Image (cartoon, rainbow, N blue to C red):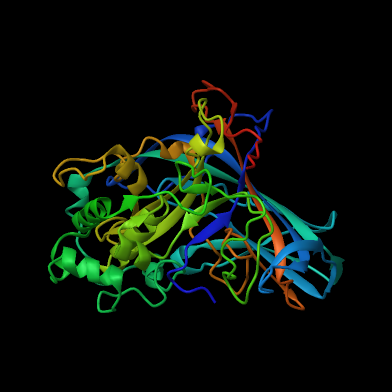
């Protein structure tokens, strides 16, 4: 089993293409996002997110000199009674909302379509939802899964003065309270400041052992963001030959990295190409260094430890015109959303408000934090979130499924047990459709979000 200090490169192949011929939807036809004066949404963009998973099972046929780990593989065919694959879906985030019933997908096993009707399951921790695909009995060497979902993404404008007037609720709504439950890479137990560990030690130090609830939750969120901003120095992974600028890495072909399975047992990835590089929040707290993904993981853990609901959002952005390769693309981004609650909203029924914080963009804008009394771009207010499409709240599904050596957002399980060794690939594609006003004025209908490309060592 993986220990919480293990660093994990997530196998992920990035590329894409534009879907041509889409008709720009009318503003009145879009799903309505939550509305509250603390966080206003504007400039909607409709996006189609495509996720593709490919997996091929292998048998080891060559051993290393010490006989411990295989270095060569052959394709393995095995009989499966049943198999289940799960992929994340998104319902609502601070800056995006899914088009209802827009999730579609198809599971292919050795080229045969065996399930094109996914079942939506959840909610799990952080209100995460997943699409479940099933097949069997079947004889197979691997599978391919393609899933699409439509989401509308918005720019956000944050009213910090109003946010600081919101009090701590007596009890957080269930959606917010679920974030305190254990989550891989964040905490193995329910988040509580009474727990021991490097993250909690930091929070107690930053708050001088005072009760964090003595200050408004919105101000506490900004204070903790400032502390993480100053505490962590971004470093590039040493095991890779070409680290990117967005927490992704390019790994030497043929190397085995992270031989421990994310969910159970031991696995291996034959030739991972590209991946997230993430470590446990405790390790980032202790070392004060980490990748672009480690900052939001630590910030999420710190907010939860202080009693403030927070969740990760793992996203993918459109490719800019000057993005010619993965090492300079800045297409992958993980950010944080913390919760506020307005008890007077909705005629006294109350309203939960999620506020986005892109701690990585804050860090990249300045190595040292800015004064708390000044507004910060990327803390609540963010004019780039209409081009950042949320993909998942978890790097690995919070269910009893596995991936190979590295978390890759998806997971699977079979009966009998899955093979010990497999190669996996993960591709994200985005196409966007602009929104036309209700008066009939139509903007540009479609534009590519990414170009099909696989970069190899």
In this view, 446 is above or below 305: above
Query: Taking the image as drawn, is residue 101 in sight?
Result: yes
Total numbered badges shown on the rendered structure: 0
**Left-right relation of 261 to 20:** left
Where does residue 242 sit, x and y in percent of width and height? 52, 43
From the viewer's perspective, is 31 left or right of 120? left
Measured from the top left, where is residue 255 in percent x and y?
63, 56
| Quadrant of the image containing the N terminus | bottom right
Q: Residue furthest top?
A: 441
Whether residue 323 sits left or right of residue 255 in the image: it is left
Q: Residue at x 39, y 71 (%)?
A: 187
| Residue 349 appears in view | no
32, above or below 228, in the image:
above
Query: Is 419 or 393 nearer to us in this picture?
Result: 419
Displayed quadrant of residue 408: bottom right
Out of 161 and 387, give the one closest to the viewer. 387
Q: Is residue 58 left or right of residue 199?
A: right
Q: Position of residue 144 (x, y in %)?
A: 75, 55
The residue nearer to you, when weighing 417 against 260, is 260
Task: Give the quadrant of residue 298.
Answer: bottom left
Which residue is nearer to you in this view: 415 or 364? Answer: 364
In the rendered image, which quarter contains the C terminus? top right
Please give the name of the residue rendered at 33% of the width and 40% of the height, measured from the top-left corner.
364
Is residue 14 depicted above or below 437 in this figure? below
Up/down of 383 relative to 312, above or below: above
Q: Position of residue 147 (x, y in %)?
A: 67, 51
**Image point 52% across, 27% down: which residue?**
436
């Amino acid at each position: 089993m993986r220990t919480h200090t293990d660093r994990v490169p997530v196998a992920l192949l990035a590329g894409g293409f534009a879907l041509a011929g889409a008709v720009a939807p009318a503003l009145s036809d879009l799903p309505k996002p939550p509305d509250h004066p603390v966080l206003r949404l504007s400039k909607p963009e409709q996006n189609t997110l495509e996720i593709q998973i490919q997996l091929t099972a292998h048998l080891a046929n060559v051993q290393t000199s010490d006989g411990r780990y295989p270095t060569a593989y052959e394709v393995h065919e095995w009989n499966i009674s049943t198999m289940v694959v799960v992929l994340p879906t998104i319902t609502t985030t601070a800056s995006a909302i899914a088009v209802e019933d827009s999730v579609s997908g198809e599971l292919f096993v050795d080229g045969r379509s065996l399930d094109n009707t996914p079942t939506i399951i959840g909610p799990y921790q952080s209100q995460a939802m997943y699409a479940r695909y099933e097949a069997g009995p079947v004889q197979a060497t691997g599978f391919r899964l393609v899933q699409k979902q439509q989401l509308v993404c918005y720019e956000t404008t944050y009213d910090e003065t109003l946010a600081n007037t919101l009090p701590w609720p007596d009890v957080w709504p269930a959606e917010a309270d679920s974030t305190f439950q254990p989550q891989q890479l964040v905490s193995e137990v329910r988040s509580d400041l009474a727990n021991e560990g490097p993250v909690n030690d930091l929070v107690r130090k930053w708050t001088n052992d005072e009760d964090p609830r003595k200050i408004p939750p919105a101000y506490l969120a900004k204070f903790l963001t400032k502390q993480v901003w100053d505490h962590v120095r971004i470093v590039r992974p040493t095991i890779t030959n070409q680290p990117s600028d967005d927490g992704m890495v390019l790994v030497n072909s043929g190397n085995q990295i992270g031989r421990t399975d994310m969910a159970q047992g031991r696995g291996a990835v034959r030739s991972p190409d590209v991946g997230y590089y993430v470590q446990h929040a405790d390790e980032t707290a202790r070392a004060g260094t980490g990748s672009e993904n480690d900052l939001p993981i630590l910030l999420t853990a710190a907010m939860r430890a202080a009693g403030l609901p927070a969740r990760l959002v793992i996203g993918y952005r459109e490719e800019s015109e000057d993005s010619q390769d993965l090492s300079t693309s800045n297409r992958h981004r993980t950010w944080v959303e913390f919760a506020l609650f307005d008890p007077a909203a909705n005629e006294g029924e109350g309203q939960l408000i999620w506020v986005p914080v892109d701690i990585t963009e804050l860090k990249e804008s300045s190595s040292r934090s800015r004064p708390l009394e000044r507004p910060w771009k990327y803390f609540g207010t963010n004019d780039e979130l209409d081009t950042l499409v949320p993909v998942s709240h978890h790097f690995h599904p919070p269910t009893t499924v596995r991936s190979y050596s590295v978390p890759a957002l998806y997971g699977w399980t079979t009966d009998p047990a899955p093979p010990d060794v497999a190669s996996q690939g993960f591709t994200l594609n985005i196409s966007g459709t602009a929104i036309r006003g209700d008066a009939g004025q139509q903007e540009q209908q479609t534009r590519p979000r990414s170009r099909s490309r696989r970069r190899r060592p």
